[in-house]
Image (cartoon, grey):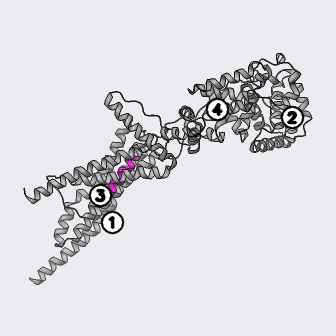
Amino acid sequence: MSKSAKSSRSKVILGCFLLFFGLALIAFGWLIPSRFKSIPFGVVSEAGQAGDSLTDKAKTALLDGNLGTADLLAEAAKELGDQKATLVASQVDMELEFNAQLERWGAWDPFLEAALKDIPVEEYSTEPGFLGVLLAKPNRSAVAKILENSRNPMVRDLLATGSFTTYKRLFPVQSTAGRPLEVCLLSLGLLAQGDHFTDELRIDLREHILEAKASGAVGELEDFYLDCLSLIRIFNWGQLKEAFSGLHSLEAAQKLRFLLHKRSEEQSLVFAMTLTSDDPDDLFAYLERYGDEGFERLKASLAAGVDGYLLALREQLPIEEEAQRASGKVLAEAGDLISQVQDFLAPYSLRNPELALGTKYGLFFIGSFTAFWGFSLFGRFYREKVSPVLALTQRVFGASASVIVFAVLSEPFLASSGAFEGYNFSFVMPVLTNVDGELQIVETTPTTSMESATLLSIAFFFVLQCLVFLICMLKVREIDRRIIEPLVKLRLMENEENLFDSGLYVGIAGTCISLVMQVIGLVDANLLAAYSSNLFGILCVAIVKIRLVRPYKTRLIIASESQIAHHIREE
């Protein structure tokens, strides 16, 4: 066997090795769970397993004596499939079985005890929640008597707003239809007297009260009272004080009220999500962005553990769904192997999010570079010799473009702009004849000036055109460095006209492929991303032809004419 044949065979073997090794690196990088535009469920589950479950939170509330909160948290845990929550729920029932008063209150309170200790439960209203406790006239009178003697300025200011006559949807306490407002103010007064308001909510509420006193404008204050009426009807006292202990503004109360009516069949879960979040505003911001689908995935994260749920709220990123089991023995075994690898890497990704993301994209780049290198070693019928610098440039930019492609493909929410319909937490007036009222929920889809998928598409096409430009520039330099006559160089430049027009071909191809993918539904329709490829192609060819090829050809023509004139003079 000749040396050339042996060399060709060794290059094929090396090319196969580099190609498959590069593909293996890409596949391994694909399996690394990372947080960029979404959070893998494995990472959320790993975080959740390290902390308390929702049942643990329910048991803590039970031990703390807040039976109403423990009951709702246990109910939410049962809805999430935690069988241990049944025991907590039964313990709550045992505690409430022989204490009818505590069953209506949900938790013992010294001010309620002082006011209602002599009033039997039979005289309470049949309305649900804490509304049923205060709606009865004897109860309202007893609680009002306690609060009227309070020295707490917040309580005194709240009670003073009951005599305002500028309400549009509520009626002053002194009027015959003033019961809803009185119930609301007494409930808020008990919360303020027991110091169950956050500092931010107390300051915000006091600011609105002082403004209403000075100007008579009670619009926002009235909205807040209507929100509170709705919450008072849903929650008992134990649940109400826990809910308000996490709210930081009047707007947060409105959003909680909206969410409870939006998910009216899952109010226990809404309460659990609000209570277990570090800041309910994080929950509301998440749902404003991701809507119903975000709520469902938060449920899954809460089922895995409270810390996983908190991780999703801190990151404000959508949670990837768990991979479905593949049908067939071989596919099922492969799926199990992939799941095992991802579960093994989940703790690493949880502890080192930036490093995991860098490792993932680093493997994409190295794997693509190696695969391109291996592919270039395969024998072909025609091979144009190129300089090492040009070959290295092609591989580097090809690998860079591949990283962008793999980034889009490996992130399920990166290429799908507008995939979520977020909640629009808008205030809707309830009907006063029914304290709770019917809500007309209006939702809008949040829009941004430019989606991340659009930016990535534009960046990808820009990188491709940069690659084309560098290839053209290196080809010009390669011709310029050859020790040949200027006329020959000029002919070589004319021979490369198709190469110098390749930017336009690549741009048109990118636009066509983008439009086809949009038509068949692989990506969301986005003409800006599609036509940016054609635009970059036109600009690239214009720069190559005007700023690169034309000046060099001009120089070659002048050199050729000078050389011809010199030969004529010599002859």
Q: Is residue 527 magenta?
A: no
Viewer-closest of 545 and 270 = 270
Q: Which labelled disc corresponds to residue 159?
A: 2
Closest to the camera, between mark 1 and mark 4, is: 4
Q: Which residue is mark 4?
A: 272
Callout 3 amino acid: Gln
Task: Residue at 23% x, 70% y: name it.
Answer: 480
Q: Is residue 397 magenta?
A: yes
The reply to whether dot 3 and dot 4 touch (C-beta < 8 Å) is no
Q: For residue 155, what is the image quadrant? A: top right
- Chain-order first, disc 1 or disc 3: 3
Q: Which residue is mark 3?
A: 394
Q: Residues within 10 Å of mark 4 (few under 14, many from 20)?
A: many
Tell me the magenta residue range.
Answer: 392-406
Callout 2 amino acid: Leu
Q: For residue 76, what is the image quadrant? A: top right
Disc 3 is placed on an element classified as helix
Q: Which residue is mark 1?
A: 547
Spatial CA span between label 1 and label 3: 21 Å
Q: Residues within 10 Å of mark 1 (few under 14, many from 20)?
A: few
